[in-house]
């Protein structure tokens, strides 16, 4: 058994839990603030199943995008731990990169969810989905929910590529081929 891999696996597990809980909660709260006219939580407490479906799809969509922050944070930590220059300055740099990836992903998750609602409004101009969901229209809620999840799945691939491209891998030498 390779203990270094076990330790990195546990570290990744705990970072995943932390990132998931913090980012999903923050994105959900920001979403509620931005869509305050919708009054989601009061409708949810009033047994509005349509609101529950939409909020559930928002959380799932956020999770699909937020999961893209985990690999870059783990990679930066591994680069620091396995690197030869472990100094307080490099440690702070590692924390800065990790926080930057988390912040970038949180912003992109929220943007993707808001973008999906905006796009849904544009492609269904005769349907006031806010009013229909307030009236507990389950069919509209399911349609909006799947639309949000679909956009999040598609945008998460782009977020993954962006965050992986920003990882500060150390420069590697080249091997000449003769």
Image: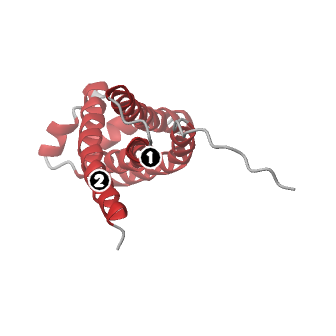
- Residue appearing at x 29%, y 56% in the figure: 13
Quadrant in the rendering for residue 95:
top left
As drawn, the residue found furthest toward the left would be 45
Q: Is residue 48 left or right of residue 172?
A: left
Give the quarter of the figure containing the C terminus. bottom right
User: Which of the numbered marks, if any, corresponds to residue 5?
Assistant: none
| Residue that carries the numbered disc 2 in the rendered image | 11
The answer to which of 144 and 104 lies nearer the viewer is 104
Q: State whether residue 72 is above or below residue 99.
A: below
Q: State whether residue 147 is above or below residue 114.
A: below
- Residue 55 appears at what percent x and percent y? 29, 45
Q: Secondary structure at mark 1?
A: helix
The answer to which of 167 and 69 lies nearer the viewer is 167
Disc 2 vs disc 1: Cβ atoms closer than 8 Å? Answer: no
Number of numbered discs visible in the structure rendering: 2
Quadrant in the rendering for residue 89:
top left
- Residue appearing at x 22%, y 37% in the figure: 40
- Residue 52 appears at what percent x and percent y? 25, 49
| Residue that carries the numbered disc 1 in the rendered image | 75
Alpha-carbon distance for marks 2 and 1?
Answer: 11 Å
Judge the density around disc 1: few (<14), some (14-19), many (≥20) Cα neighbours within 10 Å. Answer: some
Give the quarter of the figure containing the N terminus. bottom left
Q: Secondary structure at mark 2?
A: helix
Q: Is residue 149 left or right of residue 16?
A: right
The answer to which of 134 and 101 lies nearer the viewer is 101
Residue 136 visible from this viewpoint: no
Q: Is residue 154 left or right of residue 38?
A: right
- Residue appearing at x 42%, y 48% in the figure: 82
Judge the density around disc 2: few (<14), some (14-19), many (≥20) Cα neighbours within 10 Å. Answer: some
Quadrant in the rendering for residue 24:
top left
- Residue 29 appears at what percent x and percent y? 24, 33
């Amino acid at each position: 058994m390779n203990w270094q891999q076990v330790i990195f696996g546990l570290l990744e597990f705990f970072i995943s839990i932390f990132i998931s809980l913090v980012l999903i909660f923050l994105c959900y709260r920001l979403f509620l603030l931005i869509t305050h006219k919708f009054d989601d939580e009061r409708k949810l407490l009033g047994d509005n199943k349509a609101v529950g479906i939409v909020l559930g799809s928002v959380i799932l969509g956020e999770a699909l995008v937020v999961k893209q922050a985990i690999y870059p944070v783990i990679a930066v930590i591994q680069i620091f731990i396995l690197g030869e220059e472990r100094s307080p300055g490099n440690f702070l740099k590692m924390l800065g990169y990790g926080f930057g990836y988390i912040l970038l992903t949180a912003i992109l998750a929220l943007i993707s969810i808001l973008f999906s609602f905006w796009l849904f409004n544009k492609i269904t101009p005769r349907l006031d989905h806010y009013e229909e969901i307030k009236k507990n229209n389950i069919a509209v809620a399911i349609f909006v929910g799947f639309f949000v999840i679909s956009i999040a799945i598609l945008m998460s691939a782009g977020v993954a590529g962006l965050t992986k491209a920003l990882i500060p891998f150390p420069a590697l030498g080249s091997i000449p081929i003769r």
